[in-house]
Amino acid sequence: MKRLARSMAGVAATGLALGHEPGDHDGARLEAKKVPVALRAFWADGFFAAAQDAFILAYLPLLASSLGANAIQIGLLSASQSFGAMLALYPGALAARRAASRRWMVVFYAGILGRLLLLASALVVAVASGQTALYMVILLFAVRAFLSNFTVPAWTSLAADIIPDALRAKYFASRNFAIQMALLAITPLGGLVLDWWGFPGGYVVALGVSFALGMCATIAYALIPEPPRREAPKTAPLRPGHMLRRPRFRTFMIATFALHFATMIAGPFFNVYLKEHLGASNFEVGWLTTTSAVSALFGQLVFGETMARRGSLWLTRMSLVVLPTLPIMWVFITEPWMVLAPNIIGGGMWAAFNLANFQGLLEVTPEEEREQYVALFHISVFFALFVSPFIGGIIIDTVGYRTAFAISGTGRLVATALFFLAIVPAVRGGMLADD
């Protein structure tokens, strides 16, 4: 127990650059004295960005439902954001290759323009109603997703440059710990705001607070020291076919695609089912969502240390033993309190998977062309997130929620098989060693 407590404390301290030895900062493209500043600013950005999302994103399907959306339209709300993200990634990769500053690219497009759209959404909810307001909110969040994901290749590339290799596993566990702390603290407050002010006032307030928290994240990200500008690549941009010739990248991308495709058949509809079919209030939706954040909170601390010892592929497989069972559990839920089981289990297992998946992505992409590989990887993920909510909405309208949950669980089993059978472990538990 004491050893576990020490490991958890060590992971938590890593994000704030506490107690490091001088050699721990070797490997970053920054001067060693600037690395602690970068780690702390990047950590704060994650915390406030998560607080921004916690105040509204869990309740976005409920906003759509309040505006008169049916299951297919709720699926459209989720799918449109994925479509916007998918369109943004490849242009974003090309822009990141030539950007004078990857940091300011992220600050301007995602940090300023993207977050101003939260205020625009608040205005729409305040002055419009019904289907008009619904489709305007869908459009605004799709554009926001485009702007946010336009910067993902630059964000990923900069993160790889400023975070030393030796600290990467523990650092991202610590940063994700901060993210879960924000979700834990803020998500129930969003539900209270919605229950107190009702519709539409509660959503207007929630979107306004979300904007304010997001701007704190923008300020934090702007404080990150950036390495000197890299020489612009002289080679032409890679074509998708060329990138897909790398077997470890291709297999990793397909397996991740399969998991997200299966997950989002049911994912956008859990909270709607919880409220409309199980009778939960907005506050109950909030605190039940928070239980997932609590589980993920401890998961980040435990699994960051585990991944440092066992590798990303081992942690991926461990989480995927459990993840397919979660939507199946929803099939048998008849009361709101019963959601505690899948939320608590899922919070920890998704924390493990997401931590390992990001580390795995860095392992299977070449440093010199990372922006383009990251863009193609995320395009495949967002294509899954774009298509599968429509399928889920059709299934729900045709045969009901429980069938959609069962199909989602079955699809997750297929993804699990890919991670177990198609991705070969390398030395020290990493991803496939040879291309």
Image (cartoon, rainbow, N blue to C red):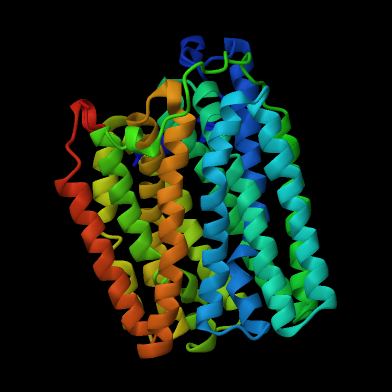
Q: Quadrant of residue 259?
A: bottom left
Q: Residue furthest left?
A: 421
Report the quarter where the N terminus lies.
Answer: top left
The residue sitting at 60% across, 36% down in the picture is 43
Report the quarter where the C terminus lies.
Answer: top left
Q: In which quarter of the image is residue 251?
A: top left
The residue sitting at 33% across, 45% down in the picture is 253
The residue sitting at 37% across, 48% down in the picture is 352
Q: Which residue lies furthest to the right in this view?
A: 127
**x and y, in percent, of residue 382 in the image:** 46, 54
Residue 321 visible in image: no
**x and y, in percent, of residue 415 in the image:** 25, 56
**x and y, in percent, of residue 395 in the image:** 37, 82
**x and y, in percent, of residue 100 in the image:** 67, 22
Q: Nearer the viewer, residue 38 or 263?
A: 263
**Residue 238 in the figure: left or right of residue 136:** left
Residue 344 visible in image: yes
